[in-house]
Amino acid sequence: VVFDASGMGMGDGTAVFLLYGCGYVQLSGFEIKNAYGRNASAILFEPGTHHAVISDFYIHNVATPSPSSEDHCANAILLMGRSGSTISNVLLYRNFIDNCETGWSEAIAVSSNVSNVNVVGNRLNDTGNIAICFSGNYGNAPSSVDFPRGGLVYGNTVTNCHCTYDTGFAIYAD
């Protein structure tokens, strides 16, 4: 099954798949392409989501309109644990992410109030800025939980991570 977001009119912070407060979810084998917009995501995890598996996805052509502008971001997969319930027990496994212009963001971003996220066996090619990032302490959640904890990044392959407006990294902990 292919989800083509072309012409979807993705506004600020929209996603093709939005997982908000759900549990025991497994999504596997889909293709998502052409998610385009300021702060657009192919897959977005929001607070309270737990025990979720995303595997064998092909995510490509995710982009933000003005990648060099600091407030323009896009993500293939974003886990954003804002105030409220923690995002927990997530496995991102064997996904292929390709040809993404993420702006000042990352292809896979695990940020703020998130625990026990495993990013294993994924392939990322031709991504902007940073391929995989675990970050926090941005004021998105109470300071005692405003960071990822208990995560694992293992066996991923990153090629051609590039950025002309900042330093590009394959895997980054912020």
Image: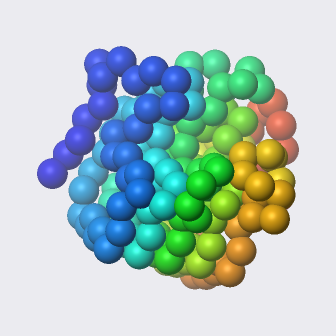
Residue beneath the point at 81% across and 30% down: 165
Give how far across and how far down residue 98 sits, in percent: 47, 49
100 or 50: which is nearer to us? 50
Residue 118 pos. (x, y %): 55, 77
Can the viewer see residue 171?
no
**Residue 11, relative to residue 99: is it above or below?**
above
In this view, the residue in front, 146 or 69, is: 146
Q: Position of residue 84 (x, y in %)?
A: 59, 55
Does the image show residue 114? yes
Q: Residue at x 25, y 35 (%)?
A: 4
- Relative to 116, does residue 41 appear above or below in the rendering? above
Q: Specify the quadrant that holds the C terminus.
A: bottom right
- Specify whether 171 is left or right of 143: left
Position of residue 59 in the picture relative to residue 131 (left or right): left
- Snapshot quadrant of residue 144: bottom right
- Residue at image coords 59%, 78%: 116
Q: Is residue 145 above or below residue 38?
A: below
Q: How many marks?
A: 0
Residue 53 vertical position relative to residue 41 in the rendered view, above or below: below
Q: Of residues 88 and 93, which is closer to you in this image?
A: 88
Classify residue 149 by image quadrant: bottom right
Furthest residue toward left: 1
